[in-house]
Image (cartoon, rainbow, N blue to C red):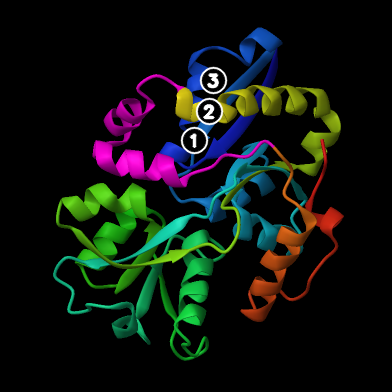
Amino acid sequence: MTEITIGGVPEHFNLAWYLTLKNGEYKKQGINLRWKDYPGGTGEMCKALKNKEIDIAVVLTEGIVKDIIEGSKNKIVQTFVQSPLIWGVHVSQNSKYQSINDLKGTKAAISRYGSGSHLMAYINAQNNNWDLKKDLNFEVIKNLEGAIDGLTKETADYFLWEKFTTKPIVDEGIFRCIGHCPTPWPCFVIAAREDFIKSHKKELQTILKIINLTTSKFKEITDIDKTISNRYGQKIEDVQEWLSLTEWSQNIIDEQTILNVQKQLLELKIIPKIVPYYDLIQKI
């Protein structure tokens, strides 16, 4: 039995992994795949890949592109979610800020530098024509719990996170969502360490085949909306809206999309250069 560890955020996007693990589908193929939750998101997973704590990660596209260009020995092996991620722009319930424009020059809570919440703060600033040097300030809060604490105690003013994940917190009256900022590209990809790809290519092919079979028919699973609602504490109507907006992928991310991601990150000065497609991608 080959032991392999995969990391991802503990959110509804990754329920397909939980279902395939629960059904023992990898073990039937001689793979002991172990899942590890990373509430801190992509920045935390990039660090875990570097430290060889995990072999594979389900990460945000923009985060792993930045990480690889900065020198990490990882490769994107497949798109996981084709549709954009809809980031909610959140403030505390009692905040004086009522619109995104009110947030200009205030402090953004981010899970860590290089994380999705950090990079999307730049995208949001650009969308609203802010000065990226003067109008962006950051407070590192590690994860969603840290964001609740930071916004409540006013050590930070706003927080970008996937809007359906934070919806229960909005419903509780802890956060207010004052706007949205969708990613201009497919949101989640599957990445793996280069050394792992070389030594476990067949096992990786098997893992992708199993997860792809599940995601291709995910919306057809009986009562999947109720399962997600119960597991993640979300209202059934929110889950149904999320399902209607979300499309999984079973393919490698294409060259033009990778170029578009890099162009946007370069324009925002998040990456220093644009690199060739195959510096970022490994076809399995």
Q: Are marks 3 and 1 in contact (CB under 8 Å)?
A: no
Of the 4 image quadrants, the one containing the C terminus is top right
Q: CA distance from mark 2 to mark 1?
A: 6 Å
Name the one closer to the observer, 102 or 200. Answer: 102
106 inside magenta stretch = no
Estimate the x, y position of residue 171 in percent, counting from the top left.
18, 51
Q: Which segment is the magenta one? A: 221-250
Q: Which mark is residue 14?
A: 1
Q: Secondary structure at mark 2?
A: helix
Of the 4 image quadrants, the one containing the N terminus is top right
Q: Is residue 93 left or right of residue 122?
A: left
Name the one closer to the observer, 50 or 183. Answer: 183
Circle 1 Cα neighbour tier, 10 Å, few/some/many (<14 / 14–19 / ≥20): some
Task: Please give the name of the residue rendered at 47% of the width and 24% of the height, measured from the top-left corner.
Answer: 220
Amino acid type, residue under disc 1 in the picture: Asn
The residue that disc 3 covers is 20
Estimate the x, y position of residue 79 in percent, counting from the top left.
66, 44
Name the one closer to the observer, 279 or 196. Answer: 279
Circle 2 Cα neighbour tier, 10 Å, few/some/many (<14 / 14–19 / ≥20): some
Q: Secondary structure at mark 3?
A: helix
Q: Are marks 3 and 2 in contact (CB under 8 Å)?
A: yes
